[in-house]
Every structure is written in structure tokens, then in C-alpha cells.
Image (spheres, rainbow, N blue to C red):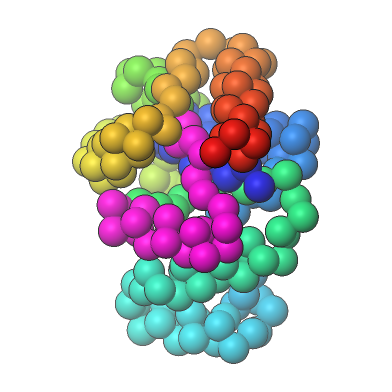
């Protein structure tokens, strides 16, 4: 499996690019938020535990999220790979993810970081807010704070993957198709390297 993490601040187009990657490469899109909501909706034992925590206003522990991701990895072991969206958010989570993936005989091959100027991010989010019900997309001060928090949290995780030489930075200031073309080239190049490693290691 070819697994990679997709990072991007609010308004970077991360969701749009993930959808296009799924369509083209048949990757499994693992959004932790969606997975947790799905478990709750299906009323599984794990879902009941998650709902209980959320109802009490508590954060879902990393071990539960890792357990859920592991279940999805096993369920989709014959897929071309997985896109990790929304996880890991901390270095500790990244290390825990690496350990779990190692047990399943796979790994994170690439960490993609979509780069967009802050002014453009704010412009995109405010515009999005005009066509959605999200009040947090309409307040410039809230938007600026969300972007600031993203960079504070993501920087250490990006450094973790950079030290492993897995970081790929992609400029997303152009059109959706221009960004996707560059992203596709990175996937193609890294996939080729991964196959080479499997053959010659």
C-alpha cells in the first residue's frame, strides 16, 4: 500500500485535492473526523465509546483513533493506498501511527503539504463562508486564528516527516487542475521509489 499524509491549512483546497486523488488512484480517504462520526452512526462498540467521550466534552484519545485507523487499514488492505487527512496532528500521533503501520507491514511514504499565502487563504475562506452555513468562515479574526493554530500544530509534525525525507511541498496558489497535476507527479514519483525500495531493499 502507498500511504501518505495530506496537510493543508483551512482554505488550502485539501478536501478537493483528496477527492480528485481518490477518483484517479482509488486511494482510500481516511478522514479521522468522518471515521469517528461513522462509527457513532453505526453504533459499534467503538462508536459507543467515542460518543460517550464526546458527549462528556472530552477528546478522543490517540489510542482509540489509532485503533480505528488500524481497522480501516485491515479492511482496505487490497487498496492501492490510503490518504491520511486530519491525523496525525502531533509528533506523538505521528510516531504512534508509524508503529501501528509497521505492524501491518506498511508505512507512510510521503507527507504532502499544500502551500497557500495567508492572504489568499483568508480570501478563499471568507468567500466560502458566503455560500455555506459555517459562521467561523465569515469572521476574519476567527479565520486568522484558525490558520495560526494550524501552523503552530503542523510545524513540528512536518519537521518529523522532513527528517525522514518524506515531505513534499506543493504550491496551491494556482488552479485546482494545476495543483492536482503537480500532486499527481509527486504521487507517481514516490510510488515508483516505493516499488524500487520493495524490490531492491
Q: Is residue 105 visible?
A: yes
> Taking 165 as reference, is 186 left or right?
right
Q: Residue at x 28, y 52 (%)?
A: 91
Q: Residue 67, position in %: x, y?
A: 51, 73
Please state, as top left, top right, bottom left or bottom right, where the C terminus lies in the image. top right
**Count of marks overlaid on the render:** 0
Q: Residue at x 56, y 67 (%)?
A: 70
Q: Residue 122, position in %: x, y?
A: 37, 26
As displayed, is residue 36 above or below residue 83?
below
As displayed, is residue 102 above or below residue 12?
below
- In the depicted view, which residue is nearer to us: 52 or 132? 52
Indicate whether residue 108 is drawn in magenta: yes
Q: Is residue 128 visible?
A: no
- Which contiguous range is marked in magenta? 90-113
Indicate whether residue 14 is drawn in magenta: no
- In the depicted view, which residue is nearer to us: 112 or 79? 79
As displayed, is residue 186 above or below residue 199?
above
Q: Residue 116, position in %: x, y?
A: 40, 20
Amino acid at each position: 500500500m502507498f500511504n501518505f499524509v495530506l496537510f493543508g491549512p483551512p482554505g488550502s483546497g485539501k478536501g478537493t485535492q483528496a477527492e480528485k486523488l481518490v477518483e484517479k488512484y482509488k486511494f482510500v480517504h481516511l478522514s479521522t473526523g468522518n471515521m469517528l462520526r461513522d462509527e457513532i452512526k453505526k453504533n459499534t462498540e467503538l462508536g459507543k465509546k467515542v460518543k460517550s467521550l464526546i458527549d462528556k466534552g472530552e477528546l478522543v484519545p490517540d489510542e482509540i483513533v489509532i485503533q480505528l485507523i488500524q481497522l480501516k487499514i485491515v479492511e482496505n488492505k487490497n487498496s492501492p493506498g490510503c490518504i491520511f487527512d486530519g491525523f496525525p496532528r502531533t509528533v506523538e500521533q505521528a510516531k504512534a501511527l508509524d508503529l501501528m503501520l509497521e505492524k501491518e507491514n506498511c508505512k507512510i511514504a510521503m507527507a504532502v503539504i499544500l502551500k497557500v499565502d495567508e492572504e489568499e487563504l483568508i480570501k478563499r475562506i471568507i468567500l466560502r463562508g458566503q455560500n455555506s452555513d459555517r459562521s467561523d468562515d465569515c469572521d476574519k479574526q476567527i479565520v486568522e486564528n484558525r490558520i495560526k493554530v494550524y501552523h503552530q500544530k503542523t510545524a513540528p509534525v512536518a519537521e518529523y516527516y522532513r527528517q525522514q525525507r518524506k515531505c513534499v511541498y506543493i504550491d496551491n496558489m494556482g488552479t485546482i487542475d494545476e495543483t492536482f497535476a503537480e500532486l499527481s507527479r509527486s504521487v507517481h514519483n514516490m510510488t515508483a521509489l516505493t516499488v524500487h525500495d520493495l524490490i531492491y531493499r
